Amino acid sequence: MPQPKGCLKSCALGCAGFAALLVIGGVIISTLAWKALNGGDDKRPLAENAVSTVVGAVNEPMSARAARLTTTQGGRVRLVLGEGEFRLRPAGPGEGLHARAEYDSTRHRLTELFTVLPDSTWEYHLDCRQVGSSSFLKQLFGGERNNAKVTVYLPAEVPIDLVLEGRRGGCDADLGGLWLRTGDIRFHQGGIELEFSSPLREPMESLRLQARMGGIAAKRVGNASPRALDIDCAMGGGDFDLRGAWRGDCTARATANMGGISIKVPSEMRVEGHGALEPTLTGSTAEVPAPVLRLSATAKMGEVEVVR
């Protein structure tokens, strides 16, 4: 039986329409990719788009504000770090809280807020993240990753509660010599190297270290001497060096899910609970009581090990 002419005509029109959609889609994708790779209407080279300045200098340099803070009034520093390279360092003598950044303003947005609360304490909030679809297309079609580079300098003369939330990227933090009351450090899809290169001004009340789909390495945590320590790793691992100048005992909890945690304790430390260890004779004396680590551990498809 012969095929109706109307059916053949419909099939032909349908195929032609589908082909047209493919062509139009290809043109749109090519246009977006070209704009992403060439910066759209912005013809300036990347070096001109980059910003290297003291964050907050538009209104008032952060160092000028921090200089007015007294050591009797503590503050909270909250850092939300997106994709990029980040560093935390102690500020130099006489320097206040400040940050320096280098980034492409067409790909990243960096904002900061500084608030003085009614009780005269303060809060500093810095947020650095990737923005816009062009950033994704530049990486997809151009294969380039122009990460933001941000360094935050923390003053040693001011008591600080530190909150650090990392979302992809990497962070290198040396917090030695600071006055940290509490620390809450969380990293997702990235890695962080944390070090307390010298003893803090006062022992920390608490320190929380969390890694998701990434890794974390903490060195000489004993110099922070936290009274409470919480370690949480999932789909990743962590190495935690607890050596340093302990000034008291520590109650710690370690949780490993689909990953591994290695905790290295100093020879003079007594470990109670998980991985119990006695201090060595060379590391402890009768005059100086051995610091005690009271450790509880939970592992699911992972392991928590304690080593000297």
Image (spheres, rainbow, N blue to C red):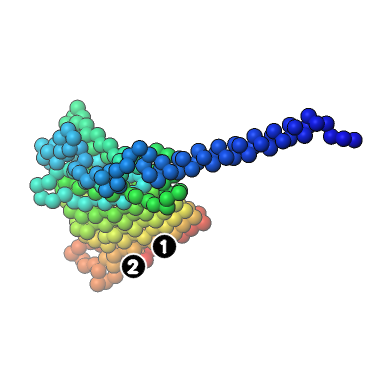
User: Which amino acid is tagged 2?
Assistant: Arg
Any part of residue 141 in sight: yes
Q: How far apart in space, not on screen, are marks 2 and 1 (Cα)?
A: 10 Å
The residue at 59%/40% (across/down) is: 22
Q: Which residue is mark 2?
A: 308
Q: Which residue is mark 1?
A: 305
Any part of residue 69 in sight: no
Quadrant location of the N terminus? top right
User: Is residue 2 depicted above or below 194 in this figure?
Assistant: above
Question: Does dot 2 land on a helix, a strand or a loop?
Answer: loop
Locate residue 40 relative to residue 243 in the image: left or right.
right
User: Is residue 288 depicted above or below 257 in this figure?
Assistant: below
The residue at 21%/67% (across/down) is: 285
Quadrant location of the C terminus? bottom left
Q: Nearer the viewer, residue 130 or 207?
A: 130
User: Which amino acid is tagged 1?
Assistant: Glu
